[in-house]
Amino acid sequence: MAASNPSRELFTAGVRAVLHSWPVLQIAVDNGFGGVYGQQKADWMVDVVQQYFHDNADLQQCEVEDFIAELMDQEFDTVVDDGSLPQVCDSLVQAFSQWQQGALEQLQQTINTLTQKKSQRVTALPTHSDEDSGDETQVMECESSVPSVSSRDPPPHDEEAGWTVVRKKK
């Protein structure tokens, strides 16, 4: 197993890239699900997850899923049911495997890709609101590779290719 401190920091950067590019966690932070210290909790989660991997070297993906689901529930009062948790955990397991095997260049490439995708994502662009009906309309850019967060809102309607209109409940 790779044990040098710089490579361990690279694995921590990999965990950070995976978690911070996860839309569910970002929505939880942005909307205050974790309270006023939501961003600090997200940063703390990076440390806890990387330590979890180091303390349990032979983890299965289902164990990682259970651990992160519990963290999201306890720290952000969020149940992840959009199907993204297995994908995130698979990315974390792959990053740890790359780190263990000493494939640090490949791990760095993964980090760069995730960081690039996060910086390109546009979350919401405000548009007009119809004051007479009380409906507010926002246009959001949707990426097919990014899973959506499930909610009790009515399903979004495609207005034009690549754009989705989300309306507030009355």
Image: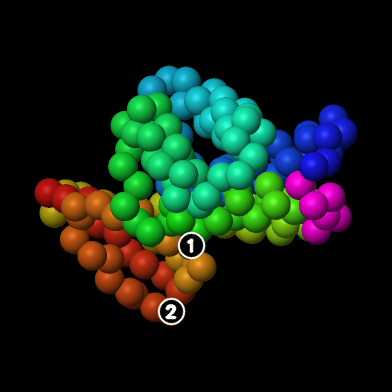
- Check disc 1: other Cα within 10 Å, few if <14, some if 14-19, many if 20+: few
Which stretch is magenta?
100-107
**Depth order, front residue of 64/75:** 64
Magenta stretch: dominant SS? helix
Whether residue 15 can be seen here: yes
Identify the amino acid type marked 2.
Answer: Ala
Q: Element type at marker 2?
A: loop
Q: Residue at x 38, y 23 (%)?
A: 35
Residue shown at 43% from the left, 79% from the top: 161
**Image quadrant for the N terminus?**
top right
**Residue 55 at x, y percent in the picture:** 62, 30
Residue 101 is a magenta residue:
yes
Q: Element type at marker 1?
A: loop
Task: Name the residue located 41 percent from the left edge and 42 percent from the top edge.
Answer: 66
- Position of 73 relative to 113 (above/below): above
Residue hosting label 1:
146
Distance from Cα at disc 1 to Cα at disc 2: 16 Å
Residue 43, given in percent of the width and then of the height, sits at 58, 29
